[in-house]
């Protein structure tokens, strides 16, 4: 699909095709990191919605398999000749001494089929040393740094116990820019206390931050989390149907700068057993099909109503 034709949004797959001429696949990795919002550095209770095994692979072992072995197993599932990004996904993947980070990232990049890294972390878990390390890799490999933001509203971040502010996210992005590193932000739509207008404001604000990609998730309430208790007490509601979510998601896409790649349209739990609400969940392919159909129905595309230009954040 051509840019700016009805139904178009900037899929990550299109970005990879444009940049490399072929697709890239991510292999999720568990590297044994922790999270400062759980180990007591920032907090002990974590974000109110978080149960890591619900959205990333957690072996439950004290010492996970080596990165090399995890990559070997991940590649076995794909066709020969594929190229991969090593996706450091579980917990906060820059939260360790820089020597330990270097050892783990370098181990992943030794694999000849791995052409880069995708590293998921918190905005308050980077510093100059870590970013210099990543900049070194980014000069030779393809590197994404994914910051969990979820909302640009500090009242919401406080309510879900994120333990950082929007300003800290902006500062992390500012420090990351200009280092050849691609930046992705994670957002959750439907957080407690947020109106649709607040969620659209978040999109407007990230347009101006200098990021390169975004992952959208619908709020999913996982059993046993603090959020589940609040949900059962009737403190907030979730999207009642996929259509309700998709309508707001398309509003967000229309407001999203067309230069920002869309890495994900909706979240999926690793096991439906863990999900308290909402009662629905769709496959990624189904969500993508419906989003495209809705944008076509609106004669619209990503960025048609964007308010700010995204600033280019790397100098290739
Ligand atoms: S920062 Fe990430 S890993 Fe830590 S509690 Fe929040 S969602 Fe969970």
Image (tube, grey):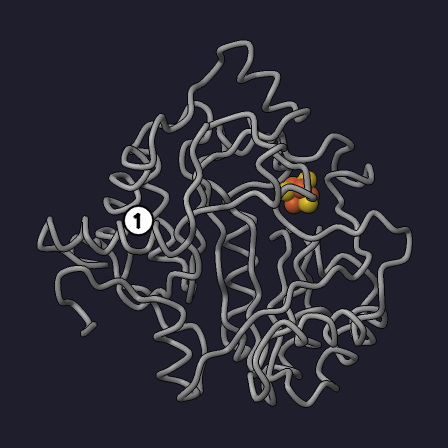
Residue 80 placement, left or right of 200: right
For the C terminus, the image quarter is bottom left
Tell me residue 158's x, y (percent).
57, 29
Q: Residue furthest top?
A: 233
Residue under numbered circle 1 = 204
Q: Indicate the position of residue 82 as horizontal and vertical percent values.
A: 55, 83
Left or right: where does residue 288 sit relative to residue 43? left
Q: Quadrant of residue 147?
A: bottom right
Residue at 49 percent across and 51 percent down: it is 186
Q: Nearer the viewer, residue 157 or 277?
A: 277
Q: Residue at x 72, y 74 (%)?
A: 71
Q: Residue at x 68, y 24 (%)?
A: 224
The answer to whether residue 247 is seen in the rendering is yes
Name the residue at 45% across, 78% down: 314
The secondary structure type at the circle numbered 1 is: helix
Q: Position of residue 21 (x, y in %)?
A: 40, 88
Who is closer to the viewer here, 262 or 180?
Answer: 262
Q: Is residue 152 visible?
A: no
Mark 1 CB within 8 Å of ligand 1 = no
Write down which quadrant ligand 1 falls in: top right
Image: 245 above or below 253: above
Q: Nearer the viewer, residue 86 or 156?
A: 86
Q: Is residue 282 left or right of residue 90?
A: left
Q: Residues within 10 Å of mark 1 (few under 14, many from 20)?
A: many
Quadrant for residue 96, please give it. bottom right
Q: How many marks?
A: 1
Q: Locate the N terminus by quadrant.
A: bottom left
Q: Decide if residue 172 is on the left or right side of residue 61.
A: left
Does residue 157 lie above or below 169 as drawn?
above
């Amino acid at each position: 699909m051509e840019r700016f034709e009805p139904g178009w949004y900037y899929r990550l797959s299109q970005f990879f095709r444009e940049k490399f001429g072929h697709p890239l696949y991510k292999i999720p990795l568990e590297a044994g990191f922790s999270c400062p919002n759980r180990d007591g550095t920032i907090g002990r209770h974590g974000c109110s919605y978080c149960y890591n095994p619900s959205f990333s692979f957690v072996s439950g072992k004290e010492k996970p398999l080596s990165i090399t072995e995890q990559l070997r197993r991940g590649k076995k599932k794909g066709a020969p000749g594929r190229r991969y990004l090593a996706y450091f996904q579980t917990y906060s993947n820059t939260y360790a001494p820089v020597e330990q980070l270097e050892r783990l990232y370098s181990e992943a990049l030794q694999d000849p089929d791995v052409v880069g890294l995708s590293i998921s972390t918190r905005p308050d878990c980077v510093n100059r040393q870590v970013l210099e390390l990543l900049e070194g890799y980014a000069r030779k490999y393809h590197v994404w740094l994914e910051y969990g933001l979820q909302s640009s509203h500090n009242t919401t971040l406080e309510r879900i116990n994120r333990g950082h502010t929007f300003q800290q996210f902006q500062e992390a992005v500012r420090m990351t820019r200009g280092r050849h590193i691609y930046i992705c932000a994670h957002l959750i739509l439907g957080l407690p206390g947020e109106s649709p207008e607040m969620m659209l404001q978040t999109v407007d604000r990230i347009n101006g931050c200098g990021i390169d990609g975004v992952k959208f998730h619908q709020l999913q309430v996982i059993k046993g989390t603090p959020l589940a208790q609040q949900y059962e007490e009737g403190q907030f509601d979730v999207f009642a149907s996929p259509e309700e979510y998709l309508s707001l998601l398309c509003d967000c896409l229309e407001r999203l700068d067309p230069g920002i790649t869309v890495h994900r349209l909706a979240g999926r739990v690793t096991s439906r057993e863990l999900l308290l609400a909402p009662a629905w969940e769709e496959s990624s392919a189904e969500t993508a099909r419906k989003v495209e159909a809705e944008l076509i129905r609106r004669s619209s595309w990503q960025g048609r109503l964007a308010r700010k230009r995204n600033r280019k954040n790397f100098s290739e």
